[in-house]
Image (cartoon, grey):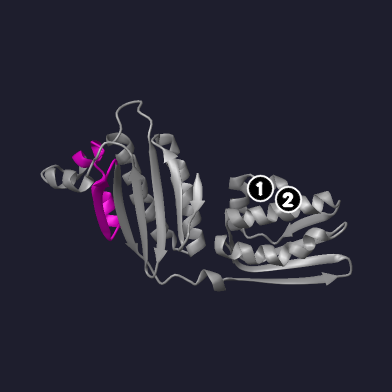
Amino acid sequence: MIRYLENMEREIIISNSLSEIAKITQFIEELSLSLQLSSCVTMSINLAIEEAVINIINHAYPTNEKGEIVLRVKAGTQVLTFLIIDDGISFDPIQTENSDVAMSLEQRLTEGLRFCLIRRTMDEVSYHTIGTLNHLTLMKKIDVLPRPEATMKTNLCKIEDVTILAIEGRLDTINANGFNAVIQPLLADTAPNIIINCEGMTYISSSGLRSFIMLQKSVSQHKGCLAVEAVQPEIRKIFDMTGCSSLFTIR
């Protein structure tokens, strides 16, 4: 489950199963797209978070014991802060690494003590326990983040009986409310004929997809037509991953 919080925070909650790792990867990929991170930075973040979560799953829970792991991320100026919270047995990877300095790198990796990889890809790492919950904090320095409130523009025009809505920039969680205000008048149209031009759209979040779906439902109810055009390959991947491609006419 993914939740969008205040102050540029978002989180995902998974169960303590290795099969859940794919959800973490998708979460990081979506985060990286929204922040326009380089592929190199994205890969290093994915590596560190994956290794940290696998360590928790393997060492913090007895066999067959069910648990919950929260990954929360906050985007600040020039830094991303990742907080991993679990309700398992306290397992401090920092102390584990310090106690095994005599082991070779191959031995560490073989035995699942992958903390060295986290150290090499993250700038700061800390661990502490609060009550029954364990907190692993990872910080990654990045370039200055763009201001999300200034990264989306829309243009609405009508040519004969066709309404064309052009989107430029990122239709992310913060910008979704503004986009909903733009499409609000279209929800009342009778037999609408709408084209959404996505040539300039560089990112769409789940909130943006929900806005698209809301418009599509309204158009269908009013027996109209909605087409999504000029979708960039990376945006199309998001539609495909979420299963939304089948809901729209994309051309």
Residue 177 picture location, percent across and down = 62, 63
Crowding at dot 2, Cα within 10 Å, few <14 / some 14-19 / many 20+, comes out as some
Residue 188 picture location, percent across and down = 82, 59
Q: Residue, x 32% and y 26% (percent of image)?
A: 63
Q: Quadrant of residue 125?
A: bottom left
Question: Is 68 on the left-hand or right-hand side of 181?
Answer: left
**6 versus 98 height, above or below:** below
Q: Which residues are magenta?
A: 107-132
Q: Is residue 200 visible?
A: no
**211 versus 169 height, above or below:** above
**65 versus 177 height, above or below:** above
Mark sitting on residue 244: 1
Residue at the top extreme of this rendering: 64
| Residue type, label 1 | Cys
Q: Name the element at disc 1.
A: helix
Residue 143 picture location, percent across and down = 39, 70
Mark sitting on residue 248: 2
Q: Quadrant of residue 64?
A: top left
| Residue type, label 2 | Phe
Q: Residue, x 44% and y 38% (percent of image)?
A: 20
Q: Contact, CB < 8 Å: mark 2 with mark 1?
A: yes
